[in-house]
Structure formats: structure tokens, C-alpha cells
Image (spheres, rainbow, N blue to C red):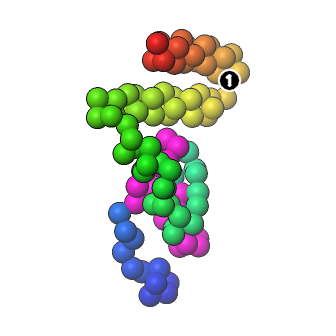
């Protein structure tokens, strides 16, 4: 292990796609990945999100809870994709679509 890889990581933002926890690749030590969905990028890019930061700053405080609720729906979509049985996937997607329609009303 090089001295550079032994340095403490800066605080990592949660995954931009699902909110999952970030972890450092133990293979390259240069990549960061999401332990929940597997999204991956270089260490130098993980916390660099100018569009996301600008959008979060523009969201009125009374809607910030809505952002987290929609993020939870996205996590459910990712969980559906992990299911092996097609009929179960179809049923869960149908329920999820109903929840999304309700959320967007
Ligand atoms: Zn993720």
C-alpha cells in the first residue's frame, strides 16, 4: 500500500443515484463505489456535483422532505431490479408505479 492510499479519505457524499454509502475500492484505491447500487467513479469525481449542489440550493426548504421521499422511491426501483422472479418484478413495479403517481399528484 502506498503512502497516498493510506491517507484518510475526505468525507464522502452519499451515492447520487440511491443515497447509498460510499466505499473505496480495495483493488485500485482510486475508485469510489456505492455499496448499495454499485455506481462507481474516480475518487476525485465522487464529491464533485455542481449540478446537484445547485439544484439542492434551489429547492425551497419546505420541499426538501419531498426530495428524500422520491429518493426512497428510487431505492425501491433499484431493489425491484435485484429480484430474480419476473412475475414478482412485474407486481412490485405495478405497486411502485401507483406510489409514484400518488407522489407526483
Ligand atoms: Zn447507489
Q: Magenta stretch containing residue 101, yes or no?
A: no
**Residue 86, quarter of the rendered image:** top right
Q: Could you tell me residue 66's position as x and y percent?
A: 38, 28
Magenta span? 12-33
> Camera-side residue: 66 or 56?
56
Residue 100 to residue 46: above or below: above
On whether residue 25 falls in the magenta region, the answer is yes
Residue 83 in sight = yes
Q: Residue at x 48, y 61 (%)?
A: 48
The residue beneath circle 1 is 85
Residue projecting furthest to the left: 61
Q: Position of residue 85 (x, y in %)?
A: 68, 23
Residue drawn where x is 67% and y is 29% of the image: 84
Image spot of residue 103 (x, y percent): 45, 17
Q: Hey, which quadrant is residue 92 in on the image? A: top right
Up/down of 98 relative to 50, above or below: above
Element assignment for label 1: loop
Relative to 43, is 91 on the left or the right?
right
Amino acid at each position: 500500500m502506498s503512502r497516498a492510499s493510506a491517507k484518510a479519505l475526505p468525507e464522502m457524499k452519499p451515492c447520487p443515484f440511491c443515497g447509498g454509502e460510499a466505499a473505496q475500492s480495495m483493488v485500485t484505491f482510486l475508485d469510489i463505489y456505492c455499496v448499495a447500487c454499485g455506481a462507481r467513479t474516480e475518487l476525485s469525481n465522487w464529491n464533485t456535483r455542481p449540478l446537484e449542489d445547485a439544484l439542492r440550493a434551489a429547492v425551497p426548504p419546505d420541499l426538501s422532505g419531498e426530495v428524500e421521499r422520491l429518493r426512497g422511491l428510487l431505492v425501491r426501483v433499484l431493489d425491484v431490479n435485484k429480484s430474480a422472479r419476473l412475475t414478482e418484478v412485474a407486481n412490485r413495479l405495478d405497486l411502485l408505479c401507483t406510489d409514484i403517481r400518488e407522489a407526483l399528484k
